[in-house]
Amino acid sequence: MKRINRIPVVSIVGRPNVGKSTLFNRIIGRQDAIVHGTPGVTRDRHYEITDWNGKQFVLIDTGGYMPDASDEINVAIREQAQFAIEESDLVILLVDAVSGLTTTELQISDTIKRARKKHLLCVNKADNENIDLDVAANKDFYKLGLGKPKSISALNSRNIGDFLDDILSELGDGFRGNVEDIEYEKNIIKLAIIGKPNVGKSSYVNAVIGKNKHIVSDVPGTTRDSIDTDFEYNGIH
């Protein structure tokens, strides 16, 4: 298995339904994260290793960030997104070109800037050149203080290659992310934790890995995506 602690970490954050999981799937090249029009489908942090032009990085998908939400699930989703920001070398704030900015984006951008992380502002759902021009001319995006907005369409793959170039440029050359440098574990042991709702699967995994990586709640169906977790015990993965 690839050793993810040797390569940079990039997270995607944003409010619900701006296309974070669609962008995540587009970048990694497969439908790994569940995508649905219903807000709040993604909850836990979702990690995958991907590469572009011979450089690898860990990509994290996060749930919809709602700064003012007070219910148990959305508070937990927000905490997971904050954990992702803290462990990232680069944070992508994804916003919606169609619905525009809300106060939520302003709050999320403040969180990113307080964390002192490298960042990119990405405007999704820019399905044609006219929207690209509107994004470039929209002064509201600059109010976030995250630099020049990059317009893309994750669904239609517009400008994705250019955006990946921007990611590598922002990360710079200080990371050991060359494909040929990444170590592989040939004898990886793969375990799956399954069971009916509310028997404690997420609690068990968190206890084993020693981290609160999975949201734990009494609400049935809290975990929706299948989540890969790298774990080492006595030198064995």
Image (cartoon, rainbow, N blue to C red):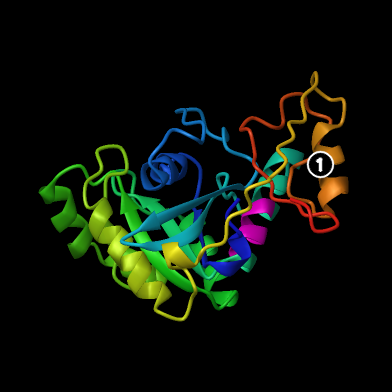
**x and y percentages locating residue 13 in the rendered image:** 51, 54
Q: Residue at x 82, y 46 (%)?
A: 206
Residue 3 percent location from the top left of the image: 61, 59
Q: Magenta part of the protein: which range?
A: 80-85
- How far across and how far down the image is residue 10, in percent? 50, 61
Is residue 83 part of the magenta span, yes or no? yes
Res 141 seen here: yes
Instruction: Examine the rendered structure and indicate whether residue 155 appears above or below residue 82.
Output: above
- Residue 111 appears in which quarter of the rendering? bottom right
Q: Is residue 20 left or right of residue 222?
A: left
* Residue under numbered circle 1: 205
- Residue at the top extreme of this rendering: 196
Q: Is residue 56 left or right of residue 217?
A: left
At label 1, the amino acid type is Val
Can residue 140 be seen in the rendering of this structure?
no
- Picture quadrant where residue 132 is located: bottom left
Q: Position of residue 8 (x, y in %)?
A: 52, 67
Q: Residue at x 85, y 39 (%)?
A: 203
* Observer-nearest of 98 and 232: 232
Looking at the picture, tell me which residue is in the foreground, 236 or 18. Answer: 236
Please check the rendered image and state whether residue 188 is part of the magenta-colored stretch, yes or no: no
Task: Looking at this view, name the residue that lies furthest to the front.
Answer: 186
- Give neighbour class at mark 1: few <14, some 14-19, many 20+ (Cα, 10 Å): some
Q: Quadrant of residue 81?
A: bottom right
Q: Is residue 156 left or right of residue 82?
A: left
Q: How many marks?
A: 1
